[in-house]
Image (tube, grey):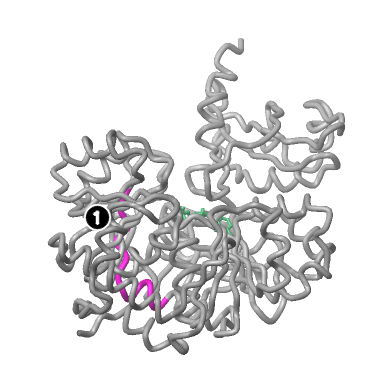
Amino acid sequence: MPNHFIDLVRAHAPDAARTFLETPEGRVVSYGELDRRSAQYANALAARGVAPGDRVALQVEKSVEAVFAFLGTLRAGAVFLPLNTAYTAPEIDYFLGDAEATVFVCDPARLGELSAVASARKVPHVLTLDREGAGTLAQVADRAATDFRDAARGEDDLAALLYTSGTTGRSKGAMLTHGNLASNALALVESWRFTSDDVLIHALPIFHTHGLFVAINLTLLAGSSMIFLPRFDPDQVLPLMARATVMMGVPTFYARLLRQPNLSSAATAHMRLFISGSAPLLADTHREWEARTDHAILERYGMTETGMNTSNPYEGERIAGTVGFPLPGIRVRVVDPQSGAGLQSGEIGMIEVKGPNVFAGYWRMPEKTASELHDGWFVTGDLGLVDARGYVQIVGRGKDLVITGGYNVYPKEIESEIDALPGVVESAVIGLPHADFGEAVTAVVVAREGAGLDEKAVLAALNGRLARYKLPKRVLFLDDLPRNTMGKVQKNRLRETYGTLYRDLP
Ligand code: AMP
């Protein structure tokens, strides 16, 4: 039966003998095997009574079998719901209850704790899958038939429910349709010139849009292959570049690879493209990478709710500190956050996005959906601008904007000044409660070892470069900024840690 996303995968599949993925241990999965194994997972789910539209939740380590489960879920017509492996039992409790999952697959090591949660939430079936791809789900699948009649699913039917990594309030389930996944992967195949000759280094987690949809769906719709790694390890990744062609990474991958003494243009000569996203790439990292490898990293911008929105060009200048142009078929505009009026190029405002990539809304949150989606335009929550050449620049999350003494301060502007100082690795600027100013601009800086930087030196260097109201009231030092698994700096954690910094001031 017609199944929108799966039919596209079939239409782009190369010869059945071609490699879909290989692992460092030498396991090779061909496109033919992918078809048979995903059919077995679809059969395993259908045998548990999973019907089109049902939610299949998984909190499992990255494995090849988890990829089979992903495609098996779509073939069964169900909705794939991957969960971050870091989530605790109370968090899982919320997701299973909110999504009303029909099946929950967890790591066997956590079965005791999580099956209790699942049964309290009346989830009918709990199965297991470990990092080697073994568990009760795999056992059922291994015995199932290797062909499956795909469930009928149209463009607008749900394919996945991805909970946002929301740092405030309840995590929201973004409803993504078959059409969202398909259109975005096709736009990326075209923009990044993927072909069946490409070999992708896949070292990202697969519970997030980046490793799951950008990396896997792109591979599928280009009929290319990937080297599927359990996690990112720079020692393992660098030698693989001799036979791979593309790497997708979060900025920390690049920063860590730069610490490898063997990183060079010779070591990366076989690669054609390095892509970065999920968090801002430091301009220094971009420059150093190009100096060491002769490759300009291509930075792109996206999010759970929309997939990818913009990308630096494949041909043409890839500009550090920008996220490039809207992808084919996608529109981007910048509006005044208060009035909603369109802004001119160069003016900072709220970034909004419209296109076939934009999700169908938040799961069972009609009010939240209505406030963030109007006439197909999604209010991203990111502040930014479109420059005179049409490149989009992200200035920060709307909620990270600092309002001090009635003035708006965009953290990125201050961070860029601090990052440019000798001896600074990176910085994060936050607003902290202050009796006089409302919020006080505060900088948290990571300095290079032995740089001898202190608060006075940073403030002296900024003086005269920034308007007085933008100058940090305090500069604090840390060895590392707190980051989540996707490499995003967790400013909320910094705000919590230093929340009372100005409280006891006279
Ligand atoms: P998530 O939904 O977890 O993928 O997070 C999406 C958010 O990550 C976006 O709304 C941006 O704030 C941020 N983000 C993604 N890519 C970039 C990028 N290239 N530069 C800056 N921020 C980014």
Give the residue type that dot 1 points to.
Answer: Trp
Q: Is residue 450 visible?
A: yes
Magenta span contains residue 117 = no
206 sits left or right of 238 in the view: left
In the rendering, at what x and y percent does residue 496 appear? Answer: 50, 27
The residue positioned 55% from the left and 71% from the top of the image is 226
Indicate left or right for 48 with 240 as reference. Answer: left
In x, y percent, where is residue 268?
Answer: 76, 69
Q: Total number of numbered labels?
A: 1
Q: Who's the residue at 56% across and 31% down the image?
A: 494
Q: Residues within 10 Å of mark 1 (few under 14, many from 20)?
A: some
Q: Which residue is outermost to the front?
A: 143
Residues in magenta, as a range: 172-183
Q: Percent x, y for residue 132?
A: 44, 54
Is ligand 1 within 8 Å of the beta carbon of the residue shown at mark 1? no
SS type, badge 1: loop
268, 282: nearer the viewer: 268
* Residue at the disc numbered 1: 363
Judge whether 410 appears above or below 436 on screen: below
Q: Quadrant of residue 70?
A: bottom left
Along the line of sight, which residue is nearer the eye, 225 or 155? 225
- One can see residue 347 in this view: no
Give me the residue at 47% from left, 66% from top: 342
**Quadrant into which the C terminus falls:** top right
In which quadrant of the rendered image does the N terminus lie?
Answer: bottom left
Q: Position of residue 111 (x, y in %)?
A: 29, 39
Q: Residue at x 52, y 32 (%)?
A: 493
- Quadrant in the picture for residue 311: bottom right
